[in-house]
Amino acid sequence: MVLTFDDGPLPATTGPVLDTLAREGVRATFFLIGRNARANPQYVRRIVAAGHTLANHTMTHPWTLRQRSFATGLQDILDGQDAIEQAAGQRIAPFFRFPGFADTPELLAELSRRNIAVWGTDLWASDWNEMTPGAQLQLLYSRVVKARKGIVLLHDTRP
């Protein structure tokens, strides 16, 4: 299993996620939004210090990348990478996840040309839906048991 967290970092939620991962001895990949990384660099550095992988999830998390021009979409991606790297004080992994998986053939080709791997997911946590922690755990656990492997998508912006 590969645990991934999208959309952070945010002070109220990323800290407890990092505490839990540390307590359980688990590493994860964090697909950060550049503006959140810029606003919360201490959490970016904490993610790095704990041995997790940093990756890019754009600068502004636009749901409309498919409606934007190639140049505008690419700039949001590159600005996100730059902001995360500045906050981290180091290069990040060459990994990218499209917000809402809204890719385009042109952006996919450009990221491939730049040797940036585009990530999807195999197991949705559905943590954007309102549910109790117990219901969330049961839902995710049932999906993990069924799949027995894969990339798990969570959000470190959700309690």
Image (cartoon, rainbow, N blue to C red):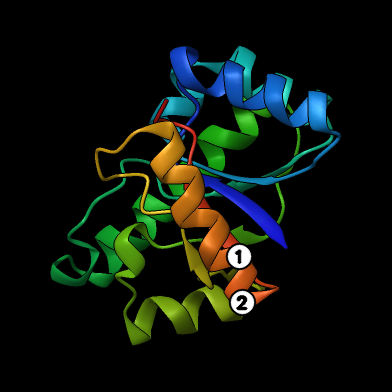
**Amino acid found under the numbered disc labelled 1:** Val
Query: Who is closer to the viewer here, 30 or 140?
Result: 140
Tell me residue 15's x, y (percent).
59, 16
Query: Who is closer to the viewer here, 142 or 105?
Result: 142
Q: Which residue is mark 2?
A: 147
**Amino acid found under the numbered disc labelled 2:** Ala
Describe the element under mark 1 as helix, strand or loop: helix
Label 2: how many Cα within 10 Å (few below 14, some 14–19, many 20+): few
Q: Residue at x 61, y 76 (%)?
A: 147
Tell me residue 39's x, y (percent).
44, 16
Asked if marks 2 and 1 touch (Cβ < 8 Å), the reply is yes
Q: Residue at x 20, y 71 (%)?
A: 66
Label 1: how many Cα within 10 Å (few below 14, some 14–19, many 20+): some
Tell me residue 95's x, y (percent).
63, 61
Describe the element under mark 2 as helix, strand or loop: helix
Query: Who is closer to the viewer here, 133 or 13?
Result: 133
Tell me residue 47's x, y (percent).
71, 28
Q: Which residue is mark 1?
A: 144
Q: Give the distance between the C-alpha atoms of the residues marked 2 and 1, in whole angstroms.
A: 5 Å
Which quadrant holds the N terminus? bottom right
Vertical arrangement, residue 46 with respect to residue 123, above or below: above
Q: Residue at x 45, y 21 (%)?
A: 10
The disc placed on residue 65 is none
Vertical arrangement, residue 2 with respect to residue 76, above or below: below
Which quadrant holds the C terminus? top left
Vertical arrangement, residue 138 with respect to residue 52, above or below: below
Vertical arrangement, residue 53 with respect to residue 152, above or below: above
